Image (spheres, grey):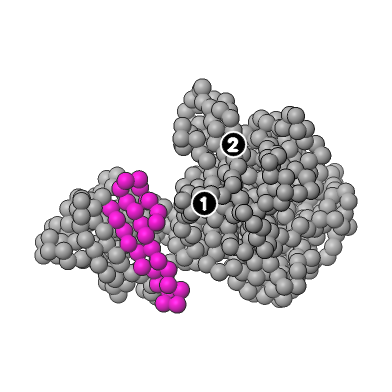
Amino acid sequence: MVELQVNVAQLWWTVNDIEQAITFELHVNTIGWIALGISPAGGMKGADIAVGWVDSSGTVHMQDRFAFDKIKPTIDNTTQDWFGLQGQEQNGWTAIQFKRYFDTCDPMDVPIKSGTNILIFAYGIVDLDLYESAVDITYHDDRRGTRILPLRSYADQPTDEMLIGLDFFDFNFNNQVIPSTDTTYYCKVFKSPSPFLAKRHAIAHKVLIDSRNEHLVHHMDLFECTSEDAIDDDKLPDGICDEIFTVVGMCYSKLATAWAIGADVMTLYPEEAGYTVTSNISSKYFMIKIHYDNPRQASNLRDSSGIRFYLANELRKFDLGYVLLGTISSPGSLAIPPQAEQFIVDSYCPPEATRNFPSSGVNIVSALPHTHLQGYSVWTKLIRNNTAVQYLFNAESFNFNYQFANQLPKTIKIYPGDAFATRCIYKTTDKNDITLGGQRTKDEMCFQTFSYYPIVDSLFACATTIDMTVWETLMNTTSPIDYMKLEQWLRNLTWTPESIAQWQEFYNKAARLAIYDRGSHDKDTGQDIHIVTNGNMLREFLEENINQLDVFVFPPTSAPLSSSSSNNNSD
């Protein structure tokens, strides 16, 4: 169950993959009509809407409607594809159960896709009347809302009662002072608690949002630090993220989980696997990074938000791990022109990145897509033997304010030599300046983080960036450049519809460096760098017309990495 609006609207649903249908049950605090719709873009225009009510005799009525624009939705004149099953009115609430097939092939319907779906809901204060045409849907003022949900892969929230009796521990801020600025990223490093000096698996975690700050905490990331060399147990790093970056940089590469406004607070891991939060070898270190959104710049704010891990009494069969796919968050990877209705950024993770995977494969469990405010679509495809096999996850309708760790309906097997292609699509019609890759909300990102088991210690991330030599050629310089020079050059560009189209063509063709971590092969960087020599072939992969991709091993070097070291894939 999801509460679409607190104390107003609740939604239950059951997915039938065999029948390719969903049975919904919508409860709304009204004795009038209620409506649920699937929207292609989050508003009324183009939305496929079910409108239902229960009349005075207890009979359920259901209408299939379509909204051509921000006007009253009309009755679908093709086929009726929302089927009312049963309903009742009780204690001032109306509850109706109804059914819809995933894809009706009706041009006035919106398919229910395997990734995220945009739901809209509304309600009236009186029923409709089939015999009085004047008694119809009227403007519903603020009796409406929007929610993005992965309808076909949503995992029911575990309850606290399910976890009673388990050991747990919390990583949380302690009445931390929050600056009176509109945007703050605050980081704090934690050490696994000393009472748990044996390997223990977490089987669930719960995000703990300070009740004082439910609208202040915009999102929270948890990272596992990959090295403790620079960490002083007597003074664990704690402060504004940018100000302490030099001492917490090793904590940014391994994302453990993330939460954002609109997401569920509880996550239950698969029965076969647990996340290793403590070790019998040495202490483990984690970093929480919280984005505080304070547009009114209020002062005297304090916060004690954090995260709780519930520990299994016995170790599970497999260790759970995370891998990040997408682009490096830097100006060299993301430079999105303003006033673009659609701008596409593609990335590719080559087969070499998965060569160390076990022959039996690994199991993808969940997907966490991520961009910032300009991104509206994120997906990743699995490439096997130069063929696009399937989506790992398709968040075709993405919204920064509703970020989920989407549980897959079925685990997806990944084998040695598999490759991945990720696409992010942005809209910048509300911006007059270029948007660059970076950590701030007004910057942009492009990645998906997947949880999987069994863990492969040699791969935490596989991300691309445009080759610096490409930028040097574009800037018509033979002198080496860094991201500071590149950013200045990019911000001085002027834009027209023609130059925006040319920029998209440049992105389609530009050579990329694919940078990934394979663990112990390189003592200095721990990373491999591949160069995708033909950017056009990326597009062929993503359009599923895959023939070949010219990829060769570039001699390991730390130079491209050091120039991007302050622009990690984090948020």
In this rendering, is residue 295 above or below 418? Answer: above
* Residue span colored magenta: 1-28
* Quadrant (top left, top right, bottom left, bottom right) of the N terminus: bottom left
| Observer able to see residue 193 | yes
Magenta stretch: residue 279 in it?
Answer: no
Could you tell me which residue is drawn at 72 percent across and 35 percent down? 245
Compare marks 1 and 2 and give the one earlier in the sequence. Answer: 1
| Label 2 element class | strand
Look at the image and tell me in which quarter the C terminus lies.
top right
Name the one closer to the observer, 405 or 555.
405
**In this image, 333 relative to 92: left or right?**
right
Residue 62 found in image quarter: bottom left
- Residue 472 seen: no
Q: Which residue type carries mark 1?
A: Leu
Label 1, on which residue?
A: 163
Q: Is residue 13 above or below residue 371?
A: below
**Residue drawn at x 57%, y 39% as measured from the top left:** 306
Vertical comparison of 169 with 392: above or below:
above
Say which mark, if any, is on residue 172: 2
Residue at (49, 59) in percent of width and height:
155
Q: Is residue 403 left or right of residue 136?
A: right
Give the percent coordinates (x, y) of residue 487. 70, 41
User: Which residue is farthest top?
Assistant: 300
Q: Position of residue 89 (x, y in %)?
A: 20, 57
Locate residue 293 relative to residue 549 in the image: left or right: left
Measure the alpha-carbon separation of dots 1 and 2. Answer: 19 Å
